[in-house]
Amino acid sequence: MIKVLKPGLATSVQDLGREGYYHLGIPPSGALDQYALSAANHLVGNPPGAAGLECTLIGPELEFQQDALVALSGALMSPRLDGEVVHQDTAFHVRAGQVLRFEFPKAGARAYLAVAGGIDVPLVLGSRSTYTLGALGGFHGRRLQAGDELPIGEPTGQGRAGNSLPMALRRSVGGDVTLRVVPGLYYERLTEAAKSSFFAEPWTVGSEADRIGYRFKGGSALSFQPREQPFGAGSDPSNIVDSCYPIGSIQVPAGLEPIVLHRDAVSGGGYAMIGTVISADLDLIGQMQPNQRAGFVAVSLEQALDARRVYKKRLKAMAALFNN
Amino acid sequence: MAETSPIRYSFGADEHLFAEVSDSMSLQAFFKGMAVTRAVERLALDGVLDVCLANASFQIRFDPDRIAPHVLLDAVQGAEAQAVAERTLHTRIIEIPVLYNDPWTHETLMRFRDRHQDPSGTDLEYAARINGLADVDAFIAAHSGAPWFVSMVGFVAGLPFMFQMVERERQLQVPKYLRPRTDTPKLTLGHGGCFGCIYSVRGAGGYQMFGVTPAPIYDPAQQLAYLKDHMVFFRPGDIVQFKPIDREAYDLAVAEVDAGRFDLRIRPLEFSLDAFLADPIGYPKTLQEALA
């Protein structure tokens, strides 16, 4: 068991998510930074999709009640085990009774904790990921609370303390971020001026940034072409007849602040989407803090697929390294 | 006509194919979307993760490592060309009890009055007025007077969007709140644009609030009989008839829910789009009779 002494801001159990229920309004969920969770899992000998802890901005305080092999990846949150510094992207032993603490991230927004054997909560609709809005999955369908005791599964025995991610496979977090976007969906509803300002101007992450979506501020308001609104769409020019929302899609309610939906997305609604962040860049959003700067750059679908191939190649290299 | 024009496709980056059947809402557009999505499901394409039907559009979530985006698009367009727009539907009609003008949505709407178009009244008073109805009672009579068609499930887990089976001139229409609320009671009846909804869980929302139902429609614990098959009750194509109830009946129903004994009146039904279009006043009444 891992006992939660302090829960942190928004710590939840996540694996790589569940597919096949978005048509019922149940989003994929899963780690916002899938690469970091996969890395932490490989280091402790887990399959990449084992359930770990996603620790957001203010990390938890965790008391291990049994010996365990643990690894941390993602945001740099100065982890200390009984006061001793432990290293990022490197597996380490924890003895029963030891306490792991974090500090506010120096860079990034989400640290991923993997423990050999994984966090052993029940599978719900094929995944152990927490979907908080629907009180589904994870640990009792919610973020962690003080006093929770998290069961640990059976380790594979393949993990080794000191296992470390090679520098070539580490990713830096923090700094200015460029998010690649395939324009589309209702992009043509924007005026030409709005199309160019959206991609040209710098944006910063707003305070409303969570697993559902990230709101961006600081750029010019985006105007939509005037039209007589179609029946059922609602009166604002940014409204459409309620439709499905892709994960990563960008909506701009009333033209004011773009919102990029993430893995706990609302599955649909009535705001026009102007494009979608490519799958290879979704991890980057999960590591962004409020007030961090971002820019959007338009790419083609082919470029999105190329970026995905590069991303998947790194994941494969990581898997090859740790799978004996 | 909108339903005969070709579907507009657009990729939501590398994992989603988005399809707009029509930019305006109609049952014809919904039926066309349903026909195409069912045809796509029958293809059972490897790499298709989720086929999501919406009011007048749909979306396919896919894994491009398993199916190339343009291979998928070709297959979907092939399905569109082949799909015979279904004009009838084997479905069910469900009676949903509603306590209109309840104390909980009233408390919530007063708390968020500064975000509303008409801070001096309630959501029901506002909706009655802008729809040209005499008073709240007349609005409730219109809202519960004809059945509703579930045309989408989503936003949050298990939330049904519903389109009332009346002529377009009689569709109740209200704008959303000026700024969304951060809170909506669980099982609130909402309305925005031409769509009704039932908030399946407590949370943020922008729809006007008219009442609450005691009937859970989403429950991961699946405690009631009608939620045993799936934690999400509603499916697109379901037909809903609202039944106004008083506070006493509401409290009784909540007690039944808590005791695990509550059940819904559900009857099988054959819906004909052509019969509805030919007689939009008389045909829905024949559907209501299935509940008698």
Image: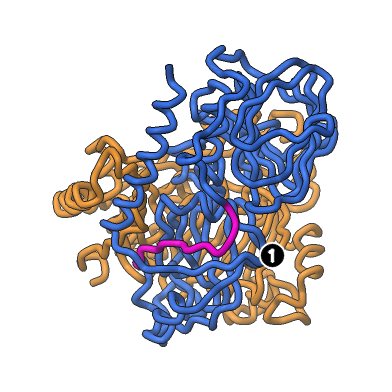
Left or right of B99 in this view: B79: left
Which chain corresponds to the colour orange?
B
In the figure, the shade used to draw chain A is: blue
Measured as percent of width and height from the top left, residue B213 is found at: 67, 50
Dot 1 corresponds to which residue? A207
Residue B1: x percent and y percent?
23, 72
Quadrant position of residue A60: top right
Q: Residue at horizontal 19%, vertical 54%?
A: B77
Q: Which residues are magenta?
A: A173-184
Q: Residue A194: horizontal and vertical position, in percent?
A: 43, 82
Which of the 4 quarters of the picture holds residue A77? top right
Q: Position of residue A201 (x, y in %)?
A: 50, 78
> How many marks are shown on the rendered structure?
1
Quick one: SS at disc 1? strand
Closer to the camera in the image, B240 or A156: A156
Please name whichever residue, A94 or B164, is drawn nearer the observer in this view of the structure. Answer: A94
> Residue type at mark 1?
Ser
Q: Residue at x 60, y 77 (%)?
A: A218
B36 part of magenta stretch: no
Residue shown at 30%/40% (left/top)?
A: B65
Judge whether residue A181 is colored magenta: yes
**Whether residue B243 can be seen here:** no
Q: Tell me which residue sits at (71%, 55%) in the image.
A: B99
